[in-house]
């Protein structure tokens, strides 16, 4: 009887193993087929291309890094943003360990992505650049718009391309709940009630970006008047202005950048400068540090970080029009877009950065 039970047990085990390896073989065969299968897609520029049916590896340009981190951090093959000790606590260790690259054709090819995501303004020039990059690398380049007014379409396009609709639906839900109303209410603000704002960049605050620049788009979105009357500097932006121009513009509010670090040198320069002290903003204590963790909420990179920046700016400039619970919304935003649940201490530091408690902003590019 014991021998019979032993033989029966062995037979059952053999049958189970055979079934397991049959299923494993079938799964592997399906995976191989999917890895070689393709489909045709159309990007937001109207360009058609053939991509793998199952996209696993993504290279994204610098402006689109925060966007792609929100959608699918596990698909990224590299990182292209500066890291500081104040950035790293909010990002996944797997992302921080990715190689840092500057985006040369040779580097992209070595990374072997299935698709290149290009997030930027869509126009004939950028479409030509995307076509050339695809030709040089042999990899399809999928363009999405970085325009804040087109986040809905951008999230939808990426969700379908990468089969991450559950995540992009969460992102779209956040937009509809908190962001969409900003543009609607901004159009209803009378001209005489619009706040006049200067966006201070550079070491002394004497660089800025005028209305119409994607670097300062938040001001246009929330219904503020961007006082800067200068030409738009191509590329990195940051048009130079003189103190004489600034005093003539005499803004009611100054919003201060931080660059890619946390030293707050611009804010300190403005607060200690006798000429800056002559502006309405400084006289009335209306100079505000824009939050910057893990990345600037206003700009650089001009990605989905601007969504939270627009909410923060709208509440700051027009508290009687926009009524937000910033603590609640910030926690929700970090959970959805950074896959990180803020502690109470982190929340306080993020919303009210204090240079005395911030860590050393050592660059961690490599």
Image (cartoon, rainbow, N blue to C red):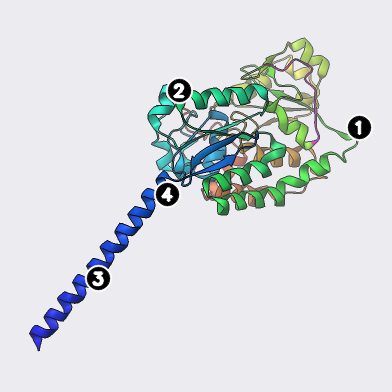
Write down the region rendered in magenta.
Answer: 223-233
Please name the residue that numbered disc 3 is placed on: 16
Q: Are marks 2 and 4 in contact (CB under 8 Å)?
A: no
Q: What is the spatial separation of the Cα atoms under label 1 and label 2, in whole angstroms?
A: 50 Å
Whole-percent x, y for residue 136 in the image: 47, 23
Mark 4 or mark 3, whichever is nearer to me: 4
Q: Which quadrant holds residue 236?
A: top right
- Name the element at disc 1: helix
Vertical placement of residue 22 versus 8, above or below: above
Please name the residue that numbered disc 4 is placed on: 34
Q: What is the spatial separation of the Cα atoms under label 4 and label 1, in whole angstroms?
A: 59 Å
Residue with the most extreme bottom position: 1
- Name the element at disc 2: helix
**What residue sits 48% from the left and 46% below the top?**
53
Q: Look at the image and tell me whether residue 294 can be seen.
A: no
**What residue sits 85% from the left and 39% below the top?**
187
Whole-percent x, y for residue 239 in the image: 69, 15
Q: Are marks 4 and 3 in contact (CB under 8 Å)?
A: no
Q: Which quadrant holds residue 235?
A: top right
The label shown at residue 105 is: 2
Asked whether residue 57 is drawn in magenta, I would say no
Q: What is the spatial separation of the Cα atoms under label 2 and label 4, in whole angstroms?
A: 27 Å
Quarter of the image that includes the C terminus? top left
- Say whether residue 34 is left or right of residue 188: left
Q: How dense is the environment of label 1, judged by Cα within 10 Å: few (below 14), some, or many (20 and up)?
A: few
Out of 191 and 205, give the one closest to the viewer.
Answer: 191
Please name the residue that numbered disc 1 is placed on: 192
- Name the element at disc 3: helix
**Sequence-first disc among 1 and 2:** 2
Q: Are marks 1 and 2 in contact (CB under 8 Å)?
A: no
């Amino acid at each position: 009887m014991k021998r019979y039970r032993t033989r029966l047990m062995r037979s059952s085990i053999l049958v189970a193993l055979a079934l397991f390896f049959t299923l494993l073989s079938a799964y592997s065969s399906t995976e191989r087929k999917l890895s070689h299968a393709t489909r045709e897609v159309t990007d937001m520029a109207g360009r058609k291309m053939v991509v793998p049916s199952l996209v696993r590896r993504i290279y994204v340009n610098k402006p689109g890094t925060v966007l792609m981190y929100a959608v699918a951090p596990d698909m990224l093959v590299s990182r292209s943003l500066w890291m500081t000790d104040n950035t790293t606590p909010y990002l996944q260790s797997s992302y921080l360990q990715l190689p840092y690259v500057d985006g040369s054709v040779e580097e992209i090819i070595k990374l072997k992505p299935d698709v290149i995501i290009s997030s930027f303004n869509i126009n004939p020039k950028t479409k030509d650049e995307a076509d050339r990059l695809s030709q040089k690398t042999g990899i399809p380049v999928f363009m999405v718009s970085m325009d804040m007014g087109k986040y809905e379409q951008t999230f939808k396009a990426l969700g379908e391309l990468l089969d991450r609709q559950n995540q992009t639906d969460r992102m779209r839900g956040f937009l509809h709940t908190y962001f969409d109303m900003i543009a609607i209410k901004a159009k209803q603000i009378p001209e005489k009630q619009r706040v006049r704002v200067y966006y201070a960049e550079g070491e002394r605050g004497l660089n800025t970006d005028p209305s119409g620049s994607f670097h300062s788009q938040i001001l246009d979105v929330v219904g503020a008047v961007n006082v800067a009357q200068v030409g738009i500097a191509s590329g990195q932006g940051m048009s130079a202005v003189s103190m004489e121009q600034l005093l003539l513009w005499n803004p009611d509010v100054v919003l201060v950048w931080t660059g890619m670090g946390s030293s707050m040198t611009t804010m300190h320069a403005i607060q200690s400068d006798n000429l800056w002290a002559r502006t309405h903003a400084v006289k009335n204590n209306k100079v505000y540090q824009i939050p910057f963790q893990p990345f600037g909420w206003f700009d650089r990179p001009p990605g989905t970080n601007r969504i939270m920046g627009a909410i923060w700016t709208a509440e700051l400039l027009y508290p009687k029009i926009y009524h937000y619970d910033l603590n609640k919304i910030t926690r929700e935003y970090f959970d959805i877009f950074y896959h990180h649940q803020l502690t109470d201490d982190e929340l306080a530091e993020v919303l009210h950065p204090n240079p005395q408690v911030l860590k050393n902003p050592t660059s961690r590019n490599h």
